[in-house]
Image (cartoon, rainbow, N blue to C red):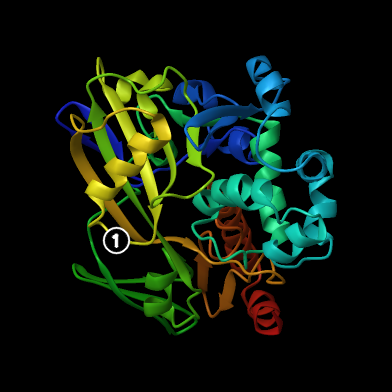
């Protein structure tokens, strides 16, 4: 999670959001200090030349009538979608985690969500959330994500997503954090671990490799999951194309954008006195700026010729793939003093990254308390 400061702007490296209903959110962060800026609890769906507000009537009363009269999908499909969202929001998390798992595509077919509402609206929204549209993602994981969307706010910290790791780092004892030394290799040696960096070597009884899955695979030889890429284009608009802090999607997918939002409608400090638009496409192709600008014009219903292209973030490994039937948790203790953490060991999310870190920390403490027993348990896992 990084936020760049560019000419008075705050630019997150790729479009990212924080869900306040993550179970670990309040446990790990001081949410008040983050000054979270919430998006509206809904979507603006572009359909033909019209734009239709779809949202949670409890938190966005203005969406009640427009949601009911959405000219997309049959009444039966609308009921099926409402049931899917309610089942995800109010089923116990434990029941979801331990229930049957299939691919998202199979789950939506079983629920009758294969028409224009399921594919054009829900499918487009989830493509941006999950980083792909193949519908092979775990339905169990998707329901857990939807649960957080429905039960809390989607937000960004007032000063950018980097405020999240910065707050964690600030709580560490002084002098324990050393940065800017690339790790070349991690090996086991004499009952512990040996870390080779460009600045020298470090030996330790335990080492946690907390890295993206591709880097972790290179360092310690674990399998790397398939990765999903996303690319975010930032533009400054002379006038805001909308007054709402809403994700906008195109149900007809007439261009590459899977979601777009005027970030400054929620978080003005991202571009004080200006209007910052973030538009995200699937894959790691940074050559589509003119097509993104054209598609944004269709979605917002405005001219975009005067928009200023600020920056493009190409993120080839934005999210690890989690296919249907895959376990939600993978081992973090590899034995011999080597541990691994990251959202590739749990769910592909901020929540998953934090949970994996807690699991790795607990496993290290167990090893330090009883080294032989811990290694035997890791071998069995």
Which one is in front, 217 or 381? 217
Determine if residue 111 is in view: yes
**Residue depicted at x 62% and y 68%:** 136
List the single residue furthest toward the front. 49
Up the image or down, 270 lies above or below 149; here it is above
Give the residue at mark 1.
285
Determine if residue 349 is in view: no
**Residue 250 image offset from top left, x and y in percent:** 49, 42
Label 1 element class: loop
Q: Give the quarter of the image for residue 101.
A: bottom right
**Residue 225 image offset from top left, x and y in percent:** 51, 74
Q: Give the quarter of the image for residue 103.
A: bottom right
Relative placement, left or right, of 366 versus 284 is right
Relative placement, left or right, of 248 versus 118 is left
**Residue depicted at x 31% and y 21%:** 269
Which one is in front, 138 or 44? 44
Which one is in front, 365 or 117? 117
Relative placement, left or right, of 123 versus 278 is right
**Residue depicted at x 25% and y 35%:** 235
Quadrant for the C terminus in the image? bottom right
Label 1 CA crowd tier, 10 Å (few <14, some 14–19, many 20+): some
What count of labels does the image hold?
1
Up the image or down, 205 lies above or below 147; here it is below
**Residue 373 image offset from top left, x and y in percent:** 69, 77
**Residue 149 image offset from top left, x and y in percent:** 64, 37
List the single residue furthest toward the left. 7
Relative placement, left or right, of 365 versus 264 is right
**Residue depicted at x 39% and y 50%:** 255
């Amino acid at each position: 999670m990084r936020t760049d400061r560019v000419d008075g702007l705050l630019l997150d490296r790729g479009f990212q959001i924080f869900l306040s209903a993550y179970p670990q959110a309040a446990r790990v962060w001081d949410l008040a200090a983050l000054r979270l800026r919430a998006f509206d609890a809904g979507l603006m769906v572009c359909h033909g030349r019209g734009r239709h507000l779809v949202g949670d009537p409890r938190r966005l009363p203005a969406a009640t009538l427009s949601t009911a009269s959405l000219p997309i999908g049959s009444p039966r499909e609308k009921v099926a979608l409402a049931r899917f969202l309610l089942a995800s929001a109010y089923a116990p998390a434990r029941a979801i985690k331990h229930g049957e798992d299939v691919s998202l595509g199979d789950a939506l077919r079983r629920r009758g969500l294969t028409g224009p509402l399921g594919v054009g609206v829900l499918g487009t929204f989830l493509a941006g959330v999950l980083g792909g549209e193949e519908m092979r993602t775990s339905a169990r994981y998707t329901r857990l994500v939807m649960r957080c969307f429905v039960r809390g706010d989607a937000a960004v910290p007032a000063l950018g997503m980097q405020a999240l790791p910065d707050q964690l780092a600030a709580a560490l004892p002084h002098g324990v954090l050393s940065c800017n030394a690339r790790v070349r290799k991690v090996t086991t040696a004499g009952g512990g671990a040996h870390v080779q960096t460009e600045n020298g070597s470090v030996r330790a009884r335990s080492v946690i490799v907390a890295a993206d899955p591709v880097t972790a695979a290179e360092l310690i030889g674990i399998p790397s999951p398939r990765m999903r890429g996303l690319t975010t284009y930032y533009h400054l608009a002379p006038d805001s194309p909308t007054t709402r802090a809403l994700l906008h999607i195109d149900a007809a997918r007439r261009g590459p954008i899977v979601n777009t939002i005027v970030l400054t409608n929620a978080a003005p400090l991202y571009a004080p006195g200006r209007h910052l638009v973030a538009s995200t496409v699937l894959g790691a192709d940074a050559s589509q700026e003119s097509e993104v600008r054209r598609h944004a014009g269709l979605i917002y219903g405005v001219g975009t010729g005067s928009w200023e292209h600020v920056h493009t973030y190409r993120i080839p490994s934005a999210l690890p793939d989690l296919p249907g039937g895959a376990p939600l948790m993978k081992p973090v203790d590899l034995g011999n003093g080597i541990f691994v953490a990251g959202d590739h060991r749990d769910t592909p999310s901020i929540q998953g990254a934090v949970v994996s870190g807690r699991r790795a920390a607990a496993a290290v403490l167990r090893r330090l308390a009883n080294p032989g027993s811990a290694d035997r348990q890791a071998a069995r896992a």
